[in-house]
Amino acid sequence: MKLGSILPLVGLMAGILPAVASAQADYPSKPITIIVPYAPGGTTDVMARALATSLSRQLKQSVIVENKPGVAGAMGVVEMKSAKPDGYMLTMTPVGIFRQPYVQPVPYDPIRDVTYIAAFLTYDFAVTVKADSPFKTVKELVDYAKKHPNEVDYSTPGRYTGNQVVLAMLAKNQGVDFNHIPYKGDSDATNALLGGHVKAAVVTNSILPHFKSGSVRLLALAGEARNPDFPGVPTLKELGYDVVVPSPLGIAGPAKLPAPIVEKLDLAVKAALEDPDVKNAAKNFGVRTYYLNHDDYAAFAKKDFASEKDLISNLGL
């Protein structure tokens, strides 16, 4: 290429690069949208709104929450994938996004198409029945399922969610069959239980108010350890069932999100976990905050995406 043709290109790049750097330094200069890939009223929605309020105060810009349920929590990634990587379109990223590519065709790659910013909480999956249910323990639920295959129907916030994985693992572990009834979110799944439409539900920490009011009975949690906000509720692991389903939740942007924007958002998420309003929202729902910075969260994403393939195959999902 001749020198005369190179010089205009160099001049063009010289003008573009400072403009890009300035845009990143001024970020955010307009409202930010965060997609919640579940229906309103559930744990993810409540915590996302508390986080958004805290981020708004820190970043001096409105942070808007949009609910887009579907694809077992992957709709946020689907919607965000084609967004401009400028930090103004983000999404909540539940672990279900790593599972979906193995169970159905999806228009995204959870590693190639996503920039992981930070994780900020971890769910507890609760095996739940109504307060007047005849099932008082997990053993009683399992024993009934052994005698009545597929008669124990249970609700969750969607197919292939971690919620479904909990009872799929328990079913495989015990050689029984449960009948899965998917809904659009925790709130709908809980209402199905309270309305007597299903015998059980596997929901997240949003069940806490119903637990406190005595309208439901929690048979077990699927975490590594008990949650002190659910006193007296054992884990499936301590009951002798080889069922542990960890579920950190984070926030992410499109691929190629610039490092300065990632760093700014990461630090803002970390600071939000010390915000009294965020702490209060977490306490009200019995949620445990769980911070991973952008590097650690990206490493977790790669590891979990790789492990989900074997999980899905082993469970026959």
Image (cartoon, rainbow, N blue to C red):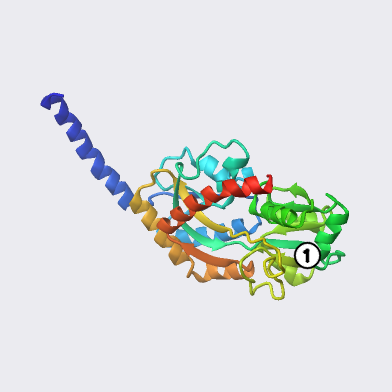
- Badge 1 density bin: few <14, some 14–19, many ≥20, Cα 10 Å: some
Residue 86 seen anywhere in this rendered image of the structure: yes
Quadrant of res 107? top right
| Residue 24 as seen in the image, left or right of residue 167 | left
Quadrant showing the C terminus: top right
Q: Element at badge 1? A: helix
How many labels were placed on the picture?
1
Relative depth, front residue between 303 and 126: 303
Q: Residue at x 57, y 70 (%)?
A: 280
Left/right placement of residue 256 relative to residue 62 reads: left
Q: Inspect this view and state whether residue 32 appears.
A: no
Q: Residue 176 placed where, x, y %?
A: 79, 53
> x%, y% of residue 314?
65, 48
Answer left or right for 25 relative to 64. left
The amino acid beneath tag 1 is Val
Residue at label 1?
138
Quadrant of the snapshot with the N terminus? top left
Residue 208, above or below 199: below
Front position in the image: 295 or 174: 174
- The image shows residue 60 at horizontal and vertical percentages of 41, 58
Q: Measuring 84% from the left and 56% from the top, which residue is drawn there?
A: 146
Q: Is residue 11 above or below residue 93?
A: above
Q: In the depicted view, which residue is nearer to us: 251 or 299? A: 299
Going 71% across and 63% down the picture, which residue do you hit? 241
